Amino acid sequence: MIFIRRAELSDAAQIQRVYASSNTLAGTLQLPYPSVEMWQERLRQMDPNDILLIAMYDGVVVGTGGLQSEKKIRRRHVASIGMGVADSFTGRGVGSALLTELLNLADNWHNLARLELTVFCDNAAALHLYGKFGFEIEGKHRAYALRNGAFVDAYAMARFHPRPPVIPESGL
Ligand SMILES: CC(C)(COP(=O)(O)OP(=O)(O)OC[C@H]1O[C@@H](n2cnc3c(N)ncnc32)[C@H](O)[C@@H]1OP(=O)(O)O)[C@@H](O)C(=O)NCCC(=O)NCCS
């Protein structure tokens, strides 16, 4: 069974393993040969209002999903999402479980109206996943990033809160 919780500093070594796999390297902006220290540093420096969730399967970290909110006042209704699942665990619902919980946090707790993400145009699995959860393509970044010697395009995707909270009528 998949279990989702917040990533702790002590998870750094297992997260490093997730991002050392070739699928996550190809689908994200990570670099080859990630170090455990880099992940420790990243976890240590995280803004306490942002969150990195991990998916555990049989006590092993098999994926992560993060919600990073914009810090500028006029963009405080916006956060970006990034995620990755270890090669050997893709296609088993881990990505869906992580995204379900990230959207629950975004919609019901973090006071966000707009979620953004960037996904390489040829990443069929991620495009399917994000489409399933209501993200829409808003545009294309050309030559967005270098991947294994070639510049690749990426889509900008976004999703708006489906049921924005309303201010209750005054009972006075
Ligand atoms: C994208 C990613 C997070 C998906 O995680 P996952 O655990 O495989 O996701 P799930 O198993 O929950 O679901 C994947 C969905 O995509 C579908 N899918 C898988 N491969 C597919 C493909 N090549 N084309 C179309 N759909 C595909 C699955 O059928 C499933 O659809 P369903 O829920 O309607 O049945 C994972 O593949 C990954 O980490 N990729 C590398 C890193 C990455 O791309 N991160 C996202 C960067 S924006």
Image: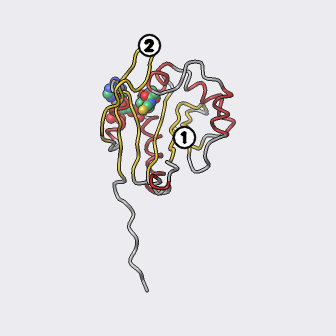
- Residue, disc 1: 3
Q: Position of residue 66 (x, y in %)?
A: 51, 40
Identify the mark at residue 149; answer none if there is no mark: 2
Q: Position of residue 54 (x, y in %)?
A: 56, 38
Which residue occupies 60% across, 23% down? 34
Determine the image quadrant of residue 166. Answer: bottom left
Could you tell me how many numbered marks the image carries? Answer: 2
Considering every residue shown, the one lying at the far top of the view is 149
126 up-or-down from 68: above or below: above
Q: Residues within 10 Å of mark 1 (few under 14, many from 20)?
A: some
Left or right of 41? Residue 20 is left
Residue 42 relative to residue 81: left or right:
right
Q: Please report the residue visible at 41 percent of the width from the left and 80 percent of the height from the top.
A: 170
Q: Position of residue 125 (x, y in %)?
A: 36, 28
- Distance from the alpha carbon under mark 2 to that under mark 1: 36 Å
Q: Is residue 99 visible?
A: yes
Q: If you read the primary sequence from the N terminus, does the residue marked by circle 2 or circle 1 appear first?
A: 1
Amino acid on which disc 2 is placed:
Gly
**Ligand 1: quadrant of the figure:** top left
Classify mark 1: helix, strand or loop.
strand
The one nearer the camera, 8 or 112, is 112
Q: Position of residue 143 (x, y in %)?
A: 37, 23
Residue 92 seen anywhere in this rendered image of the structure: no
Mark 2 or 1, closer to the camera: 2
- Is label 2 in a helix, a strand or a loop? loop
Q: Residues within 10 Å of mark 2 (few under 14, many from 20)?
A: few
Inspect the image, locate mark 1, and give the three-letter code of the amino acid beneath it. Phe
Disc marking residue 65: none
Task: Indicate if the residue with disc 2 has its beta carbon within 8 Å of ligand 1.
Answer: no
